[in-house]
Image: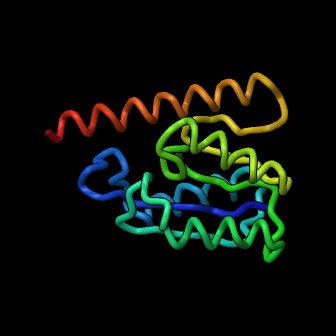
Amino acid sequence: MKVALYARTGKQAEPFCAMPIKNQLRKLRDYCKSHGHEIIKQYVDENALVTDMTRPGFWTMTDDIQEGAIEVEAVMVVTTSMLFGDKNTYMNWSYLLKENGVRIFAIAQHCDESNDFANEFMQSLFVIFDDHERRIAEFVQR
């Protein structure tokens, strides 16, 4: 499968996104190598809140996909929380990506978003859990 990798580190308000970019990319590359996926391009956003929709790496990636600058079957991330901060944003963007034949694949959650209802349901649950984890982290920071 042809994939684009996306890695992001958060700010202090997101302690659960503290895994360094190089570690995320290493995990993603290792996963791709062991599962025979071809990495087409990687995108990175450092010190970017997941709720900040001005992330340049994220926008470059989505523009590249929508404009056909890259041909990939999936965007691969460590967890969905690297891409989206809440279930509504996830649903909107996953729909737009699907329209371009691209699915989201989160390796730590062992679930990829395919056309299969069960996988979509599981992925939605992971997004809700990620959103809950973010809210708990915000509460603990206060």
Image point (55%, 44%), residue name: 80
Quarter of the figure with residue 33:
bottom right
Image point (36%, 38%), residue name: 134
User: Is 27 displayed left or right of 48 in the figure?
Assistant: right
| Colour setup of the view | rainbow
Q: Is residue 94 above or below residue 116?
A: below
- Image coords of residue 48 (percent x, y): 39, 63
Q: Is residue 81 above or below residue 135?
A: below
Q: Nearer the viewer, residue 4 or 138?
A: 138
User: Is 10 displayed left or right of 86 in the figure?
Assistant: left
Q: Nearer the viewer, residue 96 or 43?
A: 96
For the C terminus, which image quadrant?
Answer: top left
For the N terminus, which image quadrant?
Answer: bottom right
Pick out the residue farthest to the bottom: 69
User: Is 96 displayed left or right of 132 in the figure?
Assistant: right
User: Is 69 displayed left or right of 29 in the figure?
Assistant: right
Q: Nearer the viewer, residue 142 or 42?
A: 142
Image point (59%, 57%), residue name: 28
Image point (79%, 53%), residue name: 102
